[in-house]
Image: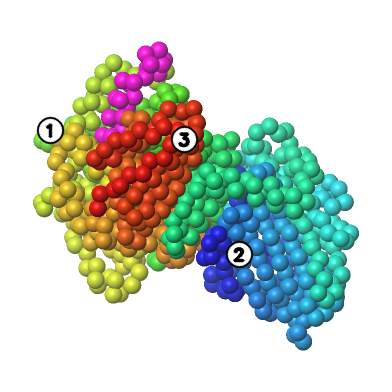
Amino acid sequence: MTGWTWEYDGYDPAEERLRESLCTVGNGYLATRGALPECDADHVHYPGTYVAGCYDRLTSEVAGRRVENEDMVNLPNWLPLRFRLDGQDWLGPDSAEVIEHRQVLHLDSGLLERRTRYGFGEERVLFVRQQRLVHMADPHLAALCTEFTAEGFADELLVEAALDGGVTNSGVARYRDLDGRHLTDVRTGSAAADTVWLRCRTRTSDIGIGMAARLTADAPVSDPHEPWRAVQHMRLSLTPGRTVAVDKTVAVHTSRDPAIGDPLRAAVDRVGAAPGFEALTQAHRIAWEQLWRRAELDVPGEAGHILRLHLFHVLQTLSPHTADLDVGVPARGLHGEAYRGHVFWDELFVLPYLDLHFPEVSRALLRYRHRRLEQARAAARALGRRGALYPWQSGSDGREETQEVHVNPRSGRWLPDHSRLQRHVGSAVAYNVWRYSEASGDAEFLHTEGAETLLEIARFWADSATYDDRLGRHRIRGVVGPDEYHDAYPGATEPGLDDNAYTNVTAAWVLCRALDLLRVLPQPRRRELVERIGLEPGEPDRWEEVSRTLHVPFHGDGVISQFEGYDDLQELDWDGYRNRYDDIRRLDRILEAEGDTVNRYKASKQADVLMLGYLFSPAELDALFTRLGYRLDEETWRRTVDHYLRRTSHGSTLSGLVHGWVLARCRRSDAWIFVQEALRGDIADLQGGTTGEGIHLGAMGGTLDLVQRGLTGLETREKTLWLDPVPLPELSSYGFSFQYQGHWGVQLRLERGLLDVVVPQSDRRPIDIRLPERAVSVPPGETVRLVLPD
């Protein structure tokens, strides 16, 4: 890490998949992994290319049953560019002598650079320098500039460039028993002397894909096409010390794109009109400069470098181009094929950051959910309930995409997958609707698509709650919480748990916000909405009742129970398992391979009770529990935090983030350990090989939000900015800019007990700021400095 670059020295096959993920370049529409263009997909390299929202569904035979899976499609590979000296084999890092190799990701400009020296003995060296971009100004363009310099010899260099349509989805080892050949009807041809094209379609979703590539150099180009590949050849004359360059410019379109007819024609026209690499780079740099200004984040030291990398990958997955697309938040970015490119609840960790920088992107991501509201209604009806039940895993059309079986790599056994019972995903959608509206001031969205989405989720929760005469409370039964380790009671024949605390408390919050929304809706709009969704007169009264009577289990020592019956589970021998296995993050797999089950133990993948302290400020959480008829004082919360800290294996990259966030407010001295875990999750591949299958977008977005909202205590509610800073000793100086209700470039800086707020000049009203012990109003064009208490 050196300021604005991310660098790798040397070639290490064992680290290549990790580097390829972290050196992915993209623009929110298109992304390509950081694989070397001269390398094919194999056990070391995986040059995947993905377009946001491009899915395909196939059926495979797994463990004696037919299993259907929808995948984000690995598109034809536009990267291939290989080279060899006359009469010799193709050069590559696994077959030739690598004297020097360096890969540099330039975060400021979105350029990936590699420098490699291949040796041939007798001091003969071929120096290869490449720059790669996926264009941030024109989302359909990508380019590769390759420079060759002969050191100590002269020779002919044969260069082969290609568009490869013979790719499959094979980037995740545990999925390789599944059918991964999503592309069919591959055709290739030439559009001009220097331009070739490839067209194909996906097998079941029938998405048309068009690619065109232009090869530019000081040499003639030939195009000896092969089946599945559009190929171009050229010969370059190498002389000692003279650099020759080859530019490959590529355009990508699919039939899902707006404002086109034929995707192939669009790709050919676009690549034909594209300027040279230098001009492309200049426009690309300007686009990235604009992004960095809107997302400015100034954090010193190593933490700041890592946060900048996290922000870079968030922006490559969800850029302003995303606002024009019908896509959700892919849990592993556009960086690989883990989780099959599906959309989970990770928007819960990503959108709060985007709300304050790129609200147009947040709105588009929420519209992805609204467009799939009818599928969510159908899912609720299938359970005999009103409202909307959003799927745990979503893809193209909003149906449940969660697999029915999954494989344990430790045991090799295929096991039932019950994670579709994580119905709390609906609360995440509602949470993001509300938080976006508070941050942006977008009443139009809140009163239309947002209201319809939020009210239907509230209806589902109210209809899912059953009254227990013995408890005198409502209960939600048969669910799974964010802690996926527990999906059933020990010895139970059916999956599901009762009264998961996270699920019930967030359901109560959704019901409260639905009631608030009904109160503030303009009367004509309220009437329209009631008629549209068929809201019955007695439903709001039931929401009121359920929001006050949902059961939250506690156990003997005054600790919030993860679910009803949690206190009856056995204690795990944590020291024993750590001594035997060292890394026990995936404790569920370890125990299953031993013939045991984590369902028997007080052991969490991530402590979902503590998620409540992540989502809600202390005041908000206290108000929620008070409304439910429970007392949640500081001592009860501290005991709850301590209880789960001792019983969590952190099998999720989100776990360290949540623990760091919560501890920053209740036990500051231990927070930094978990913040570091969250920061290093992907760069150090703490989950043991998973980063090579795609980055963890929720964790990356969450670390940004930790600085933006977690440490500042920033809340946007009641048309006021609430601030309650809790600086960590290791992160006590930082600043960032953000967008708030039409104010662009508001700056917040905390340093040595001082908080500076700068509101740029505009025609907007003053920003009201509330701290625990004071309130100030900052007009546009003004700066205020606040002294914080020790």
Residue 93 inside the magenta-drawn segment: no
> In screen coordinates, is 215 left or right of 381?
right
Magenta stretch: helix, strand or loop mostly: helix
Query: Mark 3 vs mark 1: which is more N-terminal?
Result: 1
Q: Earlier in the sequence, mark 1 or mark 2?
A: 2
The residue where tag 3 is placed is 781
**Rendered image quadrant of residue 591:** bottom left
Left or right of 476? Residue 633 is left
Q: Which of marks 1 and 2 is in front?
A: 2
Dot 1: within a 10 Å radius of its alpha carbon, few (fewer than 14), some, or many (20 or more) residues?
few
In this rendering, is residue 259 above or below 196?
above
The residue under label 2 is which amino acid type?
Val
Left-right relation of 366 to 12: left
Residue 525 located within the stretch drawn in magenta? yes
Write down the region rendered in magenta: 504-530
Image location (x, y in percent) of residue 343: 47, 44
Q: Position of residue 719 (x, y in %)?
A: 36, 30
Sequence-first disc among 2 and 3: 2
Q: Do the residues labelled 2 and 3 touch (CB within 8 Å)?
A: no
| Pick the front one: 590 or 23 | 23
- Residue with the mark numbered 1: 472
Residue shown at the point (67%, 69%) measured from the top left: 115
Q: Given the image, on which type of amino acid does mark 3 rest?
A: Gly
Which residue sits at x=65%, y=50%? 285
| Circle 2 or circle 3, nearest the eye | 3
Give the alpha-carbon distance from disc 2 to disc 3, as whole Å.
Answer: 40 Å
Query: Which type of secondary structure does the marked residue at label 1 adopt?
Result: loop
Residue 346 screen position, x and y as percent = 42, 46
